[in-house]
Image (spheres, rainbow, N blue to C red):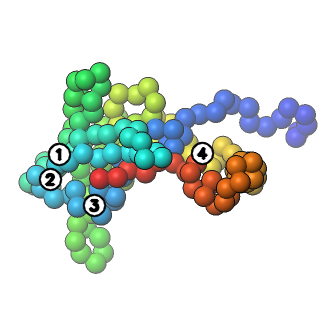
Amino acid sequence: MGGFGSGWHRGRRLTIEDGITLDLAELGRRGFLENGRNGIWQWRRFDQLVFEVGLIVDLRSDETAVVHILVRRRGEWERQTVKLETTTPTFGGKRYWFKCPLTGKRVRCLHLPPGKRQFASRAAFGLGYRSSQTCSKAWRDRMDAIARQCGANPIMVRRMFRPTRATA
């Protein structure tokens, strides 16, 4: 037990950082969770557009609340409709959740990994986290080595290699 070659040897699985993440809390902070609101949600890396989706929010009633996600593929727009559920926090108000199209579970984030055609939950796609697949010390050392080679600030290099974030 614990000898040469022991341990987990499964291949690297896709992570949430490999694809696109649609975070409902971020949509709320940016004012998208209003009935009839629509707009374009963009992901950028190094000021270059990586991906964009169109969003149309329909919150006329809690029972029929949905978000229409429009993705352009090969010049054509494809629409995915995702239901929303609501909960009431302890101190009042209303909190929205995506209902995963594949598992039916309530989630805050939907993901679109490479090669997939629709957004779904992390569990539905079996996605992991990049941090769980790398040694953070080794990653920091690698980023610091890159910074030294380039004559750059190590903290700035680490920030450059963080996952992409959406912008409205």
Q: Residues within 10 Å of mark 4 (few under 14, many from 20)?
A: some
Amino acid at the residue labelled 2: Arg
Q: How many marks?
A: 4
Residue corresponding to mark 3: 30
Lower sequence index among marks 4 and 1:
1
Whether residue 124 is visible here, answered yes or no, is: no
Q: Are marks 2 and 1 in contact (CB under 8 Å)?
A: yes
Q: Residues within 10 Å of mark 3 (few under 14, many from 20)?
A: few
Lower sequence index among marks 4 and 3:
3
Task: Name the residue: 20% across, 48% down.
Answer: 39
Task: Name the residue: 15% across, 53% down.
Answer: 37
Lower sequence index among marks 3 and 2:
3
Lower sequence index among marks 1 and 3:
3
Residue corresponding to mark 4: 130
Report helix, strand or loop for mark 2. Answer: loop
Whether residue 9 is visible here, answered yes or no, is: yes
**Which residue occupies the extreme left position in the image?**
60
Q: Nearer the viewer, mark 4 or mark 3?
A: 3
